[in-house]
Amino acid sequence: MLHQLFTVPTLLQSKGQLLDLSTPVVMGILNATPDSFYNKGQDSDMDALLRNAEKMIGEGAKILDIGGASTKPGSAIIEVEEELLRVIQVVETIHKHFPDTWLSVDTYHAQVAREAVDAGAAIINDVSSGDIDAEMLKTVAELHVPYIAMHMQGTPETMQQNPQYTDAVIEVQNYLNNICDNCKAHGIQDVIIDPGFGFGKTTAHNFQLLRSLHTLRILGRPILAGISRKSIVCKPLKVSPANALNGTTALHMIALQQGANILRVHDVKEAVECVKLWGWMQA
């Protein structure tokens, strides 16, 4: 298979620590925002976030992704100050309680990235790949942490207003290739690429990208798949996000077979089980 022909780096480096991606890892989602598409802010108070963090770590999450700004379709860009209020104390607190767990911060603001890393974050996850904040790539390079670069057509506020592509797979691949080159030019060493399922894509586009996910390995970067409870599951099955776990798990296995290195998920236990079973298929 094509994804077996192209090797990608298997180690991420951040703050003197190494994270091995030779076996796919699970990233648990922690939303520090009142308007996420799935949990509607149920985890946005500190005690609940800590309980959820402990649960995800116990279930096998290697990374926790903390976000203070909703990026669901129609969401407006929030101000830096508001995002800082939502995120920084959460990062500090979780890092204090779980110092050995890698923390990622989901942000499109360079200042949030800088303060989050100072507070204990080890990865920056930017849905805009520096398109929203022109200082982002320079900042990440100065911080010497891995960077997750994602493809999005438009902004969260506009991305689902009739997204169109001539060829979604080729256009996403070209965009991510250009971002990788830009990251390299800025001096960012570790880049993870994310095709951006649900970010400026129809259901058909999402499935085109999933069945061709292996082609992104030609870029020589680890691949993150963010499928969990999204429209790629909900629309075909006609279910709400709350009822999308079974479909999510099915597509997670496909993503692993297509070469994904990181699964970004709401439900860690089920995703970790998926990775374990995928591992048995490789034996």
Image (tube, helix red, strand yellow):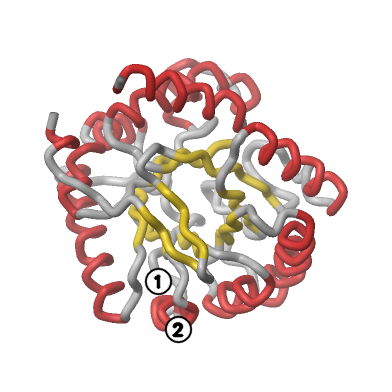
Task: Say which element carries label 1.
Answer: loop
**Which amino acid type is shown beneath numbered disc 1?**
Gly
Please name the residue shown 70% across and 48% down the image: 35
Residue 105 occupies quadrant = bottom right
- Residue picked out by circle 2: 142
**Figure quadrant of the N terminus:** top left
Residue 108 pos. (x, y %): 51, 67
Kindly identify which numbered label has been placed on residue 162.
Answer: none
- Residue positioned most to the right: 47
Residue 99 placement (x, y as % from top left) = 69, 59
User: Which part of the image, by quadrant, shows the C terminus?
Assistant: top left
Residue at position x 60%, y 57% in the image: 103
The answer to whether residue 152 is visible is no
Q: In this view, does 32 lie to the left or right of 134?
A: right
For residue 52, what is the image quadrant?
top right
Q: Left or right: 172 with respect to 202?
A: left
Q: Which of marks 2 and 1 is nearer the N terminus?
A: 1
Q: Position of residue 49 (x, y in %)?
A: 78, 48
Q: Looking at the image, is 107 positioned above or below residue 244?
A: below
Kind of residue indicated by mark 2:
Glu
**Is any atom of residue 183 visible in this view?**
yes
The relative height of residue 151 versus residue 86 in the rendered view (above or below) is above
Residue situated in front as seen by the camera: 136 or 190: 190
Quick one: 128 or 155, which is closer to the camera? Answer: 128
- Secondary structure of residue under mark 2: helix
> Residue 130: which numbered mark, if any?
1
Q: Are marks 2 and 1 in contact (CB under 8 Å)?
A: no
Q: Position of residue 34 (x, y in %)?
A: 75, 51
